[in-house]
Image: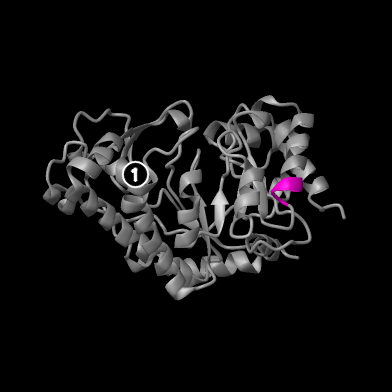
Amino acid sequence: MTHRERILTVLNRKPADRVPIDIAGFNREAYRLFVEKTGSHNPMEYFNVDTDWRGVGFTASKETIDHRAFHRNLPENASINEWGTAFVRGSNPAYDHFIAPLTYAATVKEIEDYPLHDITAPYRHEHLENSVKSIHDDGYAAFAGMACTIFEVSWQIRGYNELMMDFYDNPEMAECLLNRITDLRCFMARRYAEAGADILGLGDDVGMEDRLMMSPSVWYKWLGSRLAKVIRAAREVKPDIIIHYHSDGYIEPIILKLIEIGLNVLNPVQPECMNPAKLKNMYGDQLAFWGTMGIQGTMPFGTTDDVRKEVKERIETVGKGGGLVIAPTHVLAPEVPIENIAAFVDAAKAYGGWNS
């Protein structure tokens, strides 16, 4: 099987010739250390795994918008992304400080008038077909990433506390912002599907270590129902596109609803928050799983033997009969020794049938 055939077979919950492996990536400092220690700039190629480093995405905007005008007392060292959210860089991405431009908005009109970039402009997406073809020609599945799909982009524009309060106190403001973001995401989903992407990667972190950030009913009213529109937009064009959804943390109460609105693949399945084997037993006939190797315990602090033992357990339980792309549950931090990364890959190949 090619890498693409292997990934797609497993994500359709069928057994492949071997268990596919993904690295998940590195944060800034971890990537610097990886390059320093290996001399490689491509971890996927270096470890010979099944996922492609490129992915499929829209190009950056050429439009100039002065989002600084929406911020108050912005630090001089802040950078601003295309949504207008400001960031003060920390020592590690986990410590980057977000500054929302619409924290002080008080009316629906302020939400309506807030400038969003020209995502629908042809120059931003006319290359997508060629990107997909290039990835396919190299034997990989084309993964179209649209992380932070609705909720995270919205709270990074409005402010986390402010958006959560809007759900109750200013619902018209919440509806306006979420609908504007959803409309853009539906356009992007359609274009990815038209371009022939194999997998549409959606996601919003809505889980904490042991609970949801909100009740399941609130999640569906404000987020799940809009996520369903994005999925429908893609499936109207490409019915067999695989829907991959990411949320860190504990999200068990909304898994059935995610399946109902069209989910195929759940990521990252943090073992510190949810039991991967339990989820396989409960939903393995409806869902595939991508991840399951926690980065809070074994990967950074375990021995290489601990890593191998956990990989073996995941493949024997979650990987049984297909339905698992084994990977770390998030980008790797500098605390993860490169020896443990190598042990993860070696064990996944040994126990996942790569040597057969």
Question: Measured from the top left, where is residue 72 in percent x and y?
Answer: 19, 32
Name the side, left or right, on which 108 lies relative to 162. left
Q: Quadrant of the C terminus?
A: bottom right
Q: Quadrant of residue 2?
A: bottom right
Main SS, magenta region, reads: helix
Q: Position of residue 306 (x, y in %)?
A: 75, 30
| 174 horizontally vs 108: left or right | right
Q: Position of residue 147 (x, y in %)?
A: 45, 50
Q: Quadrant of residue 133?
A: bottom right
Asked whether the viewer can see residue 72, the reply is yes
- Identify the residue under disc 1: 81
Image point (46%, 58%), residue name: 57
**Is residue 251 magenta-colored?**
no
In this picture, which residue range is highlighted in magenta?
Answer: 315-319
Question: Regarding mark 1 in the picture, which secondary structure is present there?
Answer: loop
Residue at image coords 49%, 54%:
256
The amino acid on which the numbered mark 1 sits, given as a three-letter code, is: Asn
